[in-house]
């Protein structure tokens, strides 16, 4: 089998991928290549029969199947990982890291050193092309609910993003940097997490996995590893799209949103909001998701959460780009200093100088659809809008009305000593952002959906969005980016990279388009 044929075979088979989604379990579990007890040495790739090498081995190495199974399914009892269906480039990188010493393992290092580049490429493509099911595992999470929450929602109280943020909503991986972890055996996953935590393993991109693993307790490591073993690349129930009846989603009584010119921009902590007698308030913690009532109102709250988490699937017809609400409001709108919904909800209704009117919370949400999502808002009495308001109300339960709660919007970052600079920002972007958002800022798309959002271009926020203000973008970046490593950039770096991002082309402010259309119409009537 030639190398070209192997790669064609890999390309012909659909690779398991995740949905959209943002960061953490980065090069984790599967590091499948990890224990590839494979391949031969100095043979040219076009002369290799990768299947034979994997099943029979060569003169200088044992058969891969001895440790990784006949179908690449892995061997849970011994902790050898599943390789089948893992990304080709990811597998190749792990072998190269074993060969160079960047990743250590007493079994894999000598094997990898016996392989030339063509052999590495051929075997990586072969294992990527397989669809082998995971080997049966006896591991089971002792607290499935808590483990699922950690994998699908994270532990933001400790700045731990969800596994789905980097590995996709189905946990099937986001090539080339983030491997599939659904169905990986628990022994291997837990061992790798502990290796990152202790510094034994260091070949994760940008130290993303190290940052996550260091914050995980041993109990969390064991629980999430056991949960992932049984997840088998199926989306978590609460992240699946909520079917919506299109006819029922139209306005029932004509409560249409105002025009873009009348809408406020998304709430990121602006100071032009006037409310009666603001009250002082201490830190606020929204109620846990598990406390959502099991009744009709609770169903509407969950619908709002599902829209917020996967806006594309649940409210896509109102959107004009590839973003999700959670791209700018982390932890499903719960995280302080990430424009949390609970802090915004209690500030409305309020008079705003920007549009000289009293704005409702629905107006605020409509502004998000119009500017941040570059779309058009649902009618105010539509199921989507009612669901989003219900979810926001629930998150704000117990918060004082009219309070300027700590954590609202994005914490302002003082202007740095040097003016924000596009060139310096480009260097910061290349080192810290491109791995997820792409070198061209277009995001990372998997199966027609953005796993990591585009930061500029036609599928990003328009020029009317609050994030288009460099200071607002700098505040968000400083507090929250890179994902799971918020606060790691200096103020200067945050301002520079915000300037770089916002210097690129994006959709125009719809208010400017509206004014331009009106002028053309007026000129046409003369």
Image (tube, helix red, strand yellow):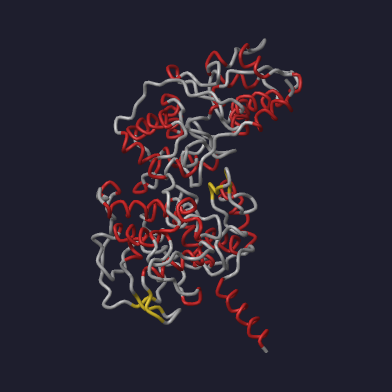
Give x and y (percent) for residue 181: 48, 33
Q: Residue furthest bottom?
A: 526
Residue under the point 42% across and 66% down: 379
Image quadrant of residue 344? bottom left
- Horizontal side of 176 relative to 325 (left or right) equals right
Give x and y (percent) for residue 327: 48, 54
Which residue occupies the foreground of this view, 517 or 510? 517
Residue under the point 59% across and 79% down: 515
Quarter of the figure that contains the N terminus: top right
- Horizontal side of 188 relative to 386 (left or right) equals right
Tell me how many marks there are.
Answer: 0
Which residue occupies the foreground of this view, 389 or 207? 389
Quarter of the figure that contains the C terminus: bottom right
Which residue occupies the foreground of this view, 105 or 382? 382
- Horizontal side of 145 relative to 170 (left or right) equals left
Q: Residue furthest front?
A: 247
Give x and y (percent) for residue 250: 43, 63
Image quadrant of residue 63? top right
Give x and y (percent) for residue 361: 36, 68
Which residue occupies the foreground of this view, 55 or 279? 55
- Horizontal side of 347 relative to 507 (left or right) equals left
Q: Is 285 situated above or below 223?
A: below
């Amino acid at each position: 089998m030639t190398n070209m044929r192997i790669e064609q075979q890999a390309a012909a088979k659909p690779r398991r991928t995740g949905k959209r989604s943002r960061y953490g379990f980065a090069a984790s579990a599967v590091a499948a290549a990890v224990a590839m007890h494979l391949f031969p040495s100095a043979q040219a790739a076009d002369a290799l029969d990768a299947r034979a090498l994997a099943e029979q081995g060569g003169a200088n190495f044992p058969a891969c199947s001895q440790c990784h199974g006949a179908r690449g399914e892995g061997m849970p009892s011994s902790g050898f990982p599943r390789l089948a269906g893992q990304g080709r480039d990811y597998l190749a990188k792990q072998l190269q890291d074993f060969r160079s010493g960047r990743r250590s393992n007493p079994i894999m290092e000598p094997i990898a050193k016996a392989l030339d580049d063509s052999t590495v490429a051929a075997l990586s493509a072969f294992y990527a092309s397989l669809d082998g099911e995971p080997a049966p595992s006896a591991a089971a999470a002792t607290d499935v609910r808590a483990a699922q929450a950690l994998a699908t929602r994270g532990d933001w109280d400790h700045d731990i993003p969800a596994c789905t943020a980097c590995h996709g909503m189905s946990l099937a991986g986001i090539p080339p940097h983030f491997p599939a972890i659904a169905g990986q055996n628990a022994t291997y996953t837990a061992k790798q997490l502990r290796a990152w935590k202790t510094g034994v393993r260091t070949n994760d991109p940008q130290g993303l996995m190290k940052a996550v693993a260091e914050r995980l307790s041993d109990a969390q490591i064991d629980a999430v590893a056991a949960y992932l073993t049984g997840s088998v690349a199926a989306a978590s129930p609460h992240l699946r799209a909520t079917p919506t009846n299109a006819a029922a989603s139209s306005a029932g009584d004509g409560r249409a949103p105002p025009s873009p010119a009348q809408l406020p921009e998304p709430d990121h902590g602006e100071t032009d909001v006037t409310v009666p007698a603001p009250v002082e308030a201490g830190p606020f913690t929204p109620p846990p998701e598990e406390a959502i009532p099991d009744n009709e109102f609770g169903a509407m709250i969950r619908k709002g959460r599902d829209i917020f988490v996967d806006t594309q699937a649940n409210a896509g017809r109102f959107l004009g780009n590839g973003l999700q609400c959670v791209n700018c409001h982390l932890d499903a709108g719960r995280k302080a200093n990430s424009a949390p919904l609970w802090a915004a909800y209690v500030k409305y209704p309020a008079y705003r100088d920007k549009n000289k009117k009293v704005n409702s919370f629905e107006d605020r949400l409509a502004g998000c659809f119009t500017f941040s999502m570059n779309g058009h808002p649902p009618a105010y009495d539509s199921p989507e809008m009612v669901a989003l308001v219900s979810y926001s109300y629930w998150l704000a339960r117990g918060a004082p009305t009219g309070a300027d709660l700590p954590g609202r919007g994005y914490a302002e970052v003082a202007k740095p000593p040097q003016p924000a600079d596009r060139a310096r920002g480009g260097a910061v972007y290349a080192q810290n952002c491109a791995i997820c958002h792409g070198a061209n800022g277009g995001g990372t798309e998997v199966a027609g959906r953005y796993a990591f959002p585009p930061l500029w271009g036609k599928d990003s926020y328009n020029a009317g969005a609050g994030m288009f203000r460099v200071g607002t973008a700098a505040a968000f970046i400083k507090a929250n980016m890179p994902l799971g490593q918020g606060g790691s950039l200096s103020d200067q770096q945050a301002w520079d990279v915000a300037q770089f991002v916002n210097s690129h082309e994006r959709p125009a402010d719809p208010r400017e388009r509206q004014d331009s259309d009106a002028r053309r119409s007026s000129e046409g009537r003369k």
